[in-house]
């Protein structure tokens, strides 16, 4: 009669332990992607960051490609859980919902240099673009649709039905994307989250001043007589008023109307696609207009 072996078959780690180790690899993969990009992220680099054996990767992922996709899927799921779902629940209060959208989009939970860089690395590399669209196409579409719906509701609540919800929502998405790009190239310790969020809210304040109150930040515009970096320039910049974003002027015949010194100013693009401004109700000297980082500023010309 054959004797039974005294050796026991190794048991798989408990489910909770497996989940922790898998997440540890995903976190390490995100860090590797941040440093090396998808093409140069290797299993060895990931496991070195995770302080794990390269052989353990096979226990959780079929291949390196599967691990990269899992990392992107984690970010997409996190975006949905941390932003899309909670903001969608606030549709009945669109002003508060848009404020929450800006706050969550630029919060340190989602908008870190490490995570933002991974989004752009997948989007930017031709070899990874298909994976990005497959995993994140719906996320991007849902975010755009949610933003447009909230903007449309604020337009109805405010009575500013002359505004185009597509143009305004596209402008907000563009502002957030630009701010994300800035974050991708910064060190986390140097990011002023409050200032970043104020810049985004300044756009909403400029479009809906009655709904998004407070004093938005006024970065000193370049051009149109403003001298940047000098005391005189700083004083002059205080007279500039933030009025909108260039994304609002991307369709033919688009215009931005804004109150300035008790009158209504109109901002358009001229035949050369340059910014132009005039008063809607009189022919007096038009206000000065300039653009900085996509934001549009006006100030009344001295008499």
Image (cartoon, rainbow, N blue to C red):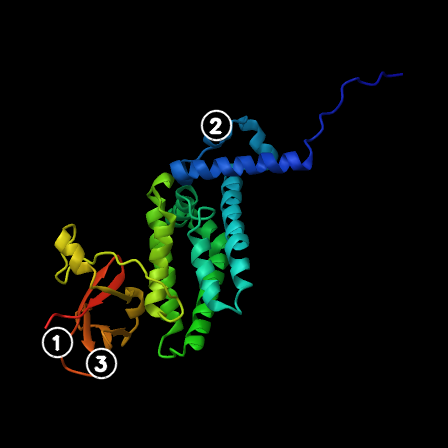
Q: Is residue 131 above or below residue 167?
A: above
**Would you identify the image quadrant in which residue 200 lies?**
bottom left
Give the residue at mark 2. 48
Give the residue at mark 1. 285
Q: Residue furthest right?
A: 1
The foreground one among 303 and 203 is 303
Q: Between tags 3 and 2, which lies in front? A: 3
Q: Residue at x 45, y 30 (%)?
A: 45
Q: Is residue 249 above or below residue 161?
A: above
Tag 2, which secondary structure? helix
Q: Earlier in the sequence, mark 1 or mark 2?
A: 2
Give the mark count.
3
Q: Residue furthest bottom?
A: 281
Q: Residue at x 37, y 56 (%)?
A: 176
Kindly indicate whether the residue at mark 2 contacts the one at mark 1 (C-beta within 8 angstroms): no
Give the residue at mark 3. 280
Judge from the rendering whether residue 22 lies leftward or rightward of residue 8; answer left or right: left
In the rendered image, residue 301, in percent from the top left (x then y), is placed at 14, 70
Q: Earlier in the sequence, mark 3 or mark 1?
A: 3
Q: Residue at x 35, y 69 (%)?
A: 209
For mark 1, does the 10 Å Cα neighbourhood hold few (<14), some (14 to 19), or many (20 or more) residues? Answer: few
Judge from the rendering whether residue 47 lies leftward or rightward of residue 226; answer left or right: right
Judge from the rendering whether residue 48 lies leftward or rightward of residue 209; answer left or right: right
Tag 3, which secondary structure? loop
Instruction: Give the quarter of the figure containing the N terminus.
Output: top right
Q: Between tags 1 and 2, which lies in front? A: 1
Question: Distance of mark 3 from mark 2, alpha carbons?
Answer: 64 Å
Q: Earlier in the sequence, mark 3 or mark 2?
A: 2
Tag 1, which secondary structure? loop
């Amino acid at each position: 009669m054959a004797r039974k072996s005294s050796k026991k078959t190794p048991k798989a780690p408990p489910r909770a332990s497996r989940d922790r180790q898998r997440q540890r690899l995903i976190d390490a993969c995100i860090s590797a992607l941040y440093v090396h990009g998808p093409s140069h992220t290797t299993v060895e680099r990931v496991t070195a960051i995770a302080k794990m054996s390269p052989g353990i990767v096979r226990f959780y992922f079929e291949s390196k490609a599967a691990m990269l996709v899992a990392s992107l899927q984690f970010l997409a799921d996190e975006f949905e859980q941390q932003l899309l779902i909670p903001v969608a629940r606030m549709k009945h209060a669109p002003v508060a919902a848009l404020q929450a959208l800006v706050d969550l989009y630029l919060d340190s939970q989602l908008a870190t240099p490490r995570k933002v860089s991974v989004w752009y690395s997948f989007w930017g590399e031709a070899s990874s673009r298909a994976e990005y669209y497959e995993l994140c196409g719906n996320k991007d579409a849902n975010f755009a649709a949610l933003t447009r719906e909230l903007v449309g509701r604020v337009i109805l609540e405010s009575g500013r039905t002359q505004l185009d919800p597509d143009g305004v929502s596209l402008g907000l998405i563009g502002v957030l994307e630009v701010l994300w790009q800035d974050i991708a190239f910064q060190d986390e310790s140097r990011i002023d989250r409050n200032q970043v969020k104020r810049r985004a809210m300044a756009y909403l304040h400029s479009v809906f001043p009655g709904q998004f109150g407070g004093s938005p930040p006024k970065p000193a515009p370049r051009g149109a007589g403003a001298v940047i970096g000098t005391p005189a320039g700083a004083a002059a910049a205080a007279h500039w008023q933030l009025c909108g974003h260039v994304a609002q002027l991307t369709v033919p015949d688009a215009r931005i109307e804004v109150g300035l010194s008790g009158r209504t100013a109109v901002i358009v693009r001229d035949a050369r696609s340059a910014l132009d401004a005039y008063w809607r109700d009189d022919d007096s000297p038009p206000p000065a207009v300039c653009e900085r980082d996509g934001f549009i500023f006006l100030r009344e010309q001295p008499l």
